[in-house]
């Protein structure tokens, strides 16, 4: 009798069984990193502070970038209104620079 490689269904069954064992037994897998975290108040405060920091930091970063873009747009608009800068008009095509090839009309 010759040995053959396990079939696809056997592999799936073994993987599903191992996955179910890991999910159903977090004590064996040590899956919960904070199960003993409620032992004292300092630990609870530390976990709360860390969670708040990690939750607020990305929001503050995105908000800061949005405020910077808003302020920059307002400064550019004010400079354009005062005549200090001239933004290109997107309605009219730009003229080609001297020496650059001219587009060929179809």
Image (cartoon, rainbow, N blue to C red):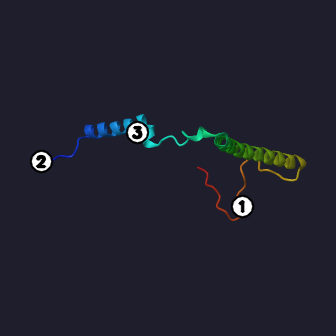
Q: Nearer the viewer, residue 104 or 49?
A: 49
Depth-wise, is mark 1 or mark 2 nearer the camera?
2
- The residue at 37%/37% (across/down) is 21
Q: Residues within 10 Å of mark 2 (few under 14, many from 20)?
A: few
* Label located before the other in sequence (3 or 2): 2
Q: Nearer the viewer, residue 11 or 62?
A: 11
Q: Which mark is residue 33?
A: none
Q: Nearer the viewer, residue 72 or 103?
A: 72
- The residue at 72%/55% (across/down) is 95
The alpha-carbon separation of the residues under discs 3 and 2 comes to 33 Å
**Mark 1 highlights which residue?**
97
Q: Secondary structure at mark 1?
A: loop
Depth-wise, is mark 3 or mark 2 nearer the camera?
3
**Mark 3 highlights which residue?**
22
The alpha-carbon separation of the residues under discs 1 and 2 comes to 79 Å
- The residue at 84%/53% (across/down) is 85
Horizontal and vertical percent position of residue 98: 72, 63
Q: Residues within 10 Å of mark 1 (few under 14, many from 20)?
A: few
Q: Residues within 10 Å of mark 3 (few under 14, many from 20)?
A: some
* Label located before the other in sequence (1 or 2): 2
Q: Quadrant of residue 13?
A: top left
Horizontal and vertical percent position of residue 92: 74, 47
**Mark 2 highlights which residue?**
2
């Amino acid at each position: 009798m010759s040995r053959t490689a396990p079939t696809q269904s056997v592999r799936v069954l073994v993987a599903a069984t191992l996955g179910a064992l890991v999910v159903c037994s977090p004590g064996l897998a040590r899956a919960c990193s904070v199960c003993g975290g409620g032992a004292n108040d300092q630990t609870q405060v530390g976990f709360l502070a860390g969670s708040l920091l990690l939750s607020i930091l990305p929001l503050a970063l995105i908000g800061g970038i949005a405020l910077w873009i808003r302020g920059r747009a307002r400064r550019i608009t004010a400079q354009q209104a005062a005549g200090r800068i001239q933004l290109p008009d997107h309605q009219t095509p730009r003229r080609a620079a001297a020496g650059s090839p001219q587009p060929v009309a179809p």
